[in-house]
Amino acid sequence: MSDIRITRIAIHTYGHEVRDLGVDYNGFNHVYEPGARRTLTGNIVTIETSAGIRGEYAGGDDAAMTQIAGFAHYLIGRDPHQRELIFNDVKRANRKNDRFGMGPIDCCLWDIAGKLYGASVWQLLGGWKTRLPAYASTYHGDEQSDGLGSPEAFAAFGVQCRDMGYPGMKIHPWGNPDIRREVANVLAARRAVDDSFDLMLDPACEYNTFTDTLKVGRACDEARFLWLEDPMKDGGISIQAYRKLRQSIRTPIMIGEHTRGLETHIDLMAEEATDLIHVDPNYDMGITGCLKIAHAAEGFGLDVQLHAPGPAQRALMASIRNTNYYEMGLVHPRIGSAVRAPIYACDYRDGLDAVDRNGCVPVPTGPGLGVTYDWDWIDKHRVGGKTFV
Ligand SMILES: [Mg+2]
């Protein structure tokens, strides 16, 4: 136990106007829409300590911030080194909700640890990878003639990504889908690129029926997709449904993005409901939570995939053996990098053109999570926040 204490926690909420981003049939999926404007918001959590070191982490939605407000009083005065104790106390206290609040807090605690020890988080985790191969993870299909409006458009975007150096692409197809177009999309994507380019499909739980899923899954078999992710409207949680699907198609299944925490991920693996397991530091109680799942999967002989891009994902991927790709998303041929809020003061970035010629991203080398934030920009675009002392 050290004599360092958590003295102050703050939530910083910013707003950022973006162009050419609309929504599809029922208002939930973001899609390309030329001329559309909307304001996106984001959150950054900071934790100050008596040592004068501040942990910083961008991530977590407004519901997560509400949860943090519910347990911030517990954190004030605690030793920030005691991540396992804090993890377990907050896990128990938040047993009635999804525990999303713990993700940004745990990432801040790791950032603090790195800064205290003068080491990167990935070094503290025993990491060794310095560059991470990334796959291009598309926006959902749209209905625009110059966007991702057809199987031909997705196929052309696959060729573009391959030519940029990406080793693979994951298609998020259309909302409220026409299953014949879904099947055609899978087959057209593979016709455009050879098998050295990995293809994945994430219908994001849009398929209404098991037979629709089977039709698309058989197309994935024919087109040799690397995985089929969260296809069905159960929300990617049904052990029964995915075990049955695994018995019916050859394409590996990936679920886990929508199940929360260690035990539910273990159940998916133990019951043979999935081939790959998805984890996310924002969704699964931080870097600590993701590590537990990754190491459990290692024991099952399975690979984890880290959901979404970010500095915490890079630190984790640098230090986990049983994982394959960094998810560079969401990307689109017409939606530029201005869609991402310019919150970083350092050269850290994500986006379609953020990979090198080999389709890789670097692992930040600075202390902690290795990124610095542009507080002038964040203060100028502040739309809310809260402080706990
Ligand atoms: Mg997904």
Image (cartoon, rainbow, N blue to C red):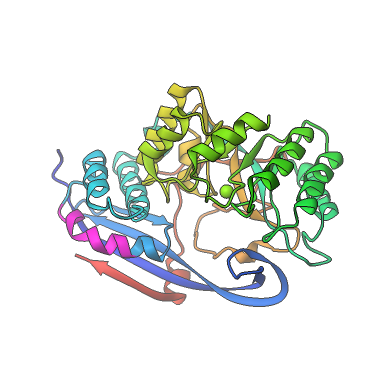
Whole-percent x, y for residue 239 in the image: 49, 38
Q: Quadrant of the N terminus?
A: top left
Magenta extent: 66-77
Q: Residue at x 46, y 23 (%)?
A: 300
For this view, does 224 lie left or right of residue 276? Answer: right
Q: Quadrant of the C terminus?
A: bottom left
Q: Is 183 or 137 nearer to us in this picture?
A: 183
In the depicted structure, whether residue 41 falls above or below residue 204:
below
For this view, does 4 lie left or right of residue 165? Answer: left
Quarter of the image for residue 77 reads bottom left
Q: Residue at x 66, y 32 (%)?
A: 248
For this view, does 348 lie left or right of residue 196? Answer: left
Q: Is residue 71 magenta?
A: yes
Q: Is residue 162 magenta?
A: no
Whole-percent x, y for residue 287 in the image: 39, 42
Q: Is 341 or 238 nearer to us in this picture?
A: 238
Q: Residue at x 36, y 46 (%)?
A: 285
Whole-percent x, y for residue 373 in the image: 44, 60
Q: Is 345 or 104 nearer to us in this picture?
A: 104
Q: Magenta stretch mostly in which secondary structure?
A: helix
Quarter of the image for residue 97 reads bottom left
